[in-house]
Image (spheres, helix red, strand yellow):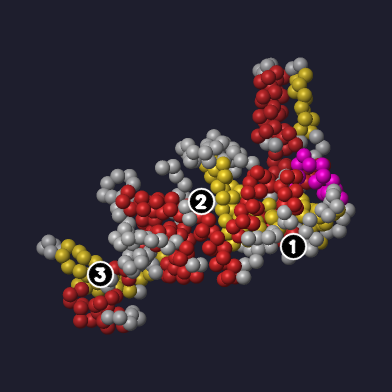
Amino acid sequence: MFLRTLRLRRKDGSEAEYVRLVESYREKGQVKQRIVATLGRKDLLAPHLDRLAELLGRSTPASRRALEPQESAVWGPMLVARHLWEELGLEELLEEKRGEGKGLSLAERAFVLVANRLICPGSEHALAQWLETDYVPDGKGERIRPVWKQNGRVRVDHRFLWPWYRTLDELIGRKERIEEGLFARLRDLFCLKPEMVFYDLTSSYFEGEGPEGLAQYGYSRDHREGNRQILLGVVMANGWPIAHHVFRGNRHDSETVLPIVADLEKRFGLRRIVFVGDRGMVSTANLGFLWSQGHGFLVGLRRRRNPEVLEYIRKAQSGSWQPCSPEGKDRVCEVEGALPGQRIFVVESAERLAYEQAMREGDVTKTREELGKLAKRIEKGELRNQEEIGSSVARILSLYRGHRYFRWSLRPGKLQVSEEPVETEKLLEGKYVILTEEKDLSPLEAVRAYKELSEVESDLSSKTWTGLRRI
């Protein structure tokens, strides 16, 4: 608990300061405050304030310190953020030559943005509200406060917003220096010795045109095919993000692998890495390039429309399986690869098996119902044009992935539908296949590494990108 002063207007028109006893508490992860008691006027309580401070555990006189406004602010999270910031040496990385009287330095502004993303993620508008509750000091120890507007839908003044927007523009110019400096610092702090490098991509779309040259129409992971987008690639090693890259929105995933590996060699001095990537990264050119440069790889293979993968899974049915989870629900089987030196791991996930089985049963039921309704319309003569019928069938099959389970043909006045055997689909369900040439990698280590990639994918898919804008 602590003391807080509040200036109030009395009935006679004069003003007086009153002292309140305030308590901080936590509710659903949020720090809140409530008034315990109003103690009276400050001038009348002045002789007793030091004693009140002592009772509340204060070491400094209440008349000098306990009633300052910042006493009611949240301190703890900023102290932790500041400690991490200094440990990583970010102050030195962002230092700049600047004159006096130019406001906050780049390092100070960057620290505020980073701390905000760690503690209470939001936009620059939300940053203003956060600064009202959390104590964030500048280089002189003075509290940073937002500038508010009196009227309008947006209550934050542009004088407050633009310095933070400019911070992002300044940081991108120092991107390579920051990444290299952080990598060197992490290597010293945690003895970081990258053996496996995890790489994954996500997309972020724009409501407007987006940055010229980068924003393009492409495969959208946000299912916003009508919006321009960019691709964001993140490189991680030993659980730490060490680099990120921005690509054109229409670039294919596999086309980004070569520049990523070349960047790791050039900037970070990594002589040999084991590249861990998803099936979108797999191409003969990529694997050949990694092999020619002396690097290793551990990649997932596409399951469907891939006869080799189907054959690997069939081999595994009569192979030797071993559990790869404490509960024993997931298991892995190593089978012989198609080429010398290749190692293939077929993995079966109980959770994935249940999900894909339920998805197949639901898709088959919905497709059967919709095709049945369409067949009745054709028999009644409500739909006769062959192009319209073909378009309707294609739409239904596409909507519920029915092309995996159904075949159809059209005869005069009748739609004939047959359900294809789903044995192939059942064989694929719950399984994924990993390819590598690493001789010393055990099946359990391969599965564990690939699951780490899934965690990277999960983090990227649940992203909240702020600060992306068109100026």
Residue type at mark 1? Glu
| Picture quarter with the N terminus | bottom left
Please state the horizontal and vertical placement of residue 469, each as a whole percent of the image.
45, 44
Residue type at mark 3? Thr
Q: Is residue 353 left or right of residue 215?
A: right
* Residue 209 visible, this angle: yes
Disc 1: which residue: 445
Q: Quadrant of residue 218?
A: top right
Secondary structure of the residue carrying numbered label 1? helix
Please state the horizontal and vertical placement of residue 261, each as a whole percent of the image.
65, 53
- Between the C-alphas of marks 2 and 1, the distance is 31 Å
Q: Earlier in the sequence, mark 2 or mark 1?
A: 1
Query: Which residue is drawn at the image coordinates 44% and 65% (left, top)?
Result: 91
Q: Is residue 152 left or right of residue 432?
A: left
**Vertical relation: 336 (above or below) 42:** above
Residue type at mark 2? Thr
Disc 2: which residue: 464
- Between the C-alphas of marks 1 and 3, the distance is 60 Å
Residue 448 lies in magenta, yes or no?
Answer: no
**Vertical relation: 301 (above or below) 331:** above
Q: Quadrant of residue 110?
A: bottom left
The numbered disc on residue 3 is: none
Please state the horizontal and vertical placement of residue 360, each as a whole percent of the image.
72, 42
Query: Which residue is drawn at the image coordinates 75% and 45% (left, top)?
Result: 284
